[in-house]
Amino acid sequence: MKRVAILISGSGSNMVALARSMARDHPARPVLALSSDVGAAGLDRARALGIPARAIEHRGRAERAEFEAALQSALVDAAAEIVCLAGFMHVLSADFVARWQGRLLNIHPSLLPLHRGLHTHARALAAGDAESGCTVHEVTAALDDGPILGQARLPILPGDTAESLATRVLGVEHVLYPAVLRRFAAGDRTPLHLP
Ligand code: GRF
């Protein structure tokens, strides 16, 4: 039974979807939720699901080494074997990634390699893309660039705004990430494509 830690920064809707997916016959279970923001709504949502949750505040780049040392200590204390970034809004250092590479996953709200970085929905609309979606990938030192483990696609509709697109993409994120984690925890890295 793989021990999964989930890192968040805000609402934690992906963390909730992952945690609920591990509730029954599943090769993994959630052992810790960590938030970079003390005010993250996801902290109480994790506790409501019975998951130990704590904040490790990210106070800016000056203290990144201190922040990551605290993350590492909490992950080791929880004996985490897989780390899922889920709405986690910080770039991790190459040193931290090196310690977890191969066991560190992220979900990104675009069809990578399109639209790495922020504001993906507005950029997809501005680019006139016919479709959008989300990608689950292994995290490497390069931003939003690691081996793809799964993608979910959906059409961009006439009249879509960044907000309406974000809402629809978030809905498929909650399907894709749990499906990818189930396979990944069972040792299967075959990329999953939805639909
Ligand atoms: C999601 O779109 C996720 O892909 C991005 O942050 C957004 C919020 O995620 N990284 P969550 O609701 O906090 O899981």
Image: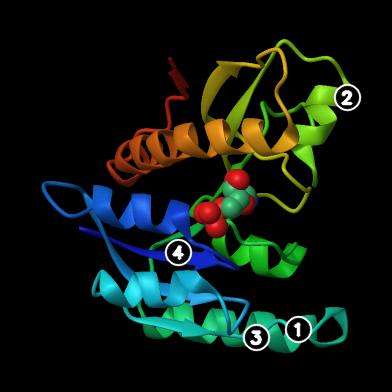
Query: Dot 2: what SS?
Result: helix
Give me the C-alpha separation between circle 3 and circle 2.
34 Å
- Closer to the chain start, of discs 3 and 2, is 3
**Residue 138 left/right relative to 189:** right
Q: Position of residue 156 (x, y in %)?
A: 66, 16
Query: Dot 3: what SS?
Result: loop
Are the residues at dot 4 and dot 2 in contact (C-beta closer than 8 Å)?
no
Report which quarter residue 16 is drawn in.
Answer: bottom left
Give me the C-alpha separation between circle 2 and circle 1.
36 Å
Q: Position of residue 22 (x, y in %)?
A: 23, 52
Which image quarter holds the N terminus? Answer: bottom left
Give me the C-alpha separation between circle 4 and circle 2.
32 Å
Give me the C-alpha separation between circle 3 and circle 4.
15 Å
Mark 1 sits on what residue? 65
Task: Tell whether circle 2 marks a residue whose Cβ is less than 8 angstroms from ligand 1.
Answer: no
Q: Is residue 61 visible?
A: yes
Give me the C-alpha separation between circle 1 and circle 4.
20 Å
Amino acid type at circle 2 is Ala
Mark 4 sits on what residue? 6
Which residue is pictured at 44% across the width and 80% down the height?
A: 76
Scheme by which the image is coloured: rainbow
| In this view, 167 is above or below 25 | above
| In this view, 43 is above or below 188 | below
- Closer to the chain start, of discs 1 and 4, is 4
The residue at the far left in this view is 25
Mark 3 sits on what residue? 57
Amino acid type at circle 1 is Ala
- Closer to the chain start, of discs 3 and 4, is 4
- Disc number placed over residue 191 in the picture, else none: none
**Residue 141 left/right relative to 105:** right
Query: Dot 4: what SS?
Result: strand
Q: Is residue 148 visible?
A: no
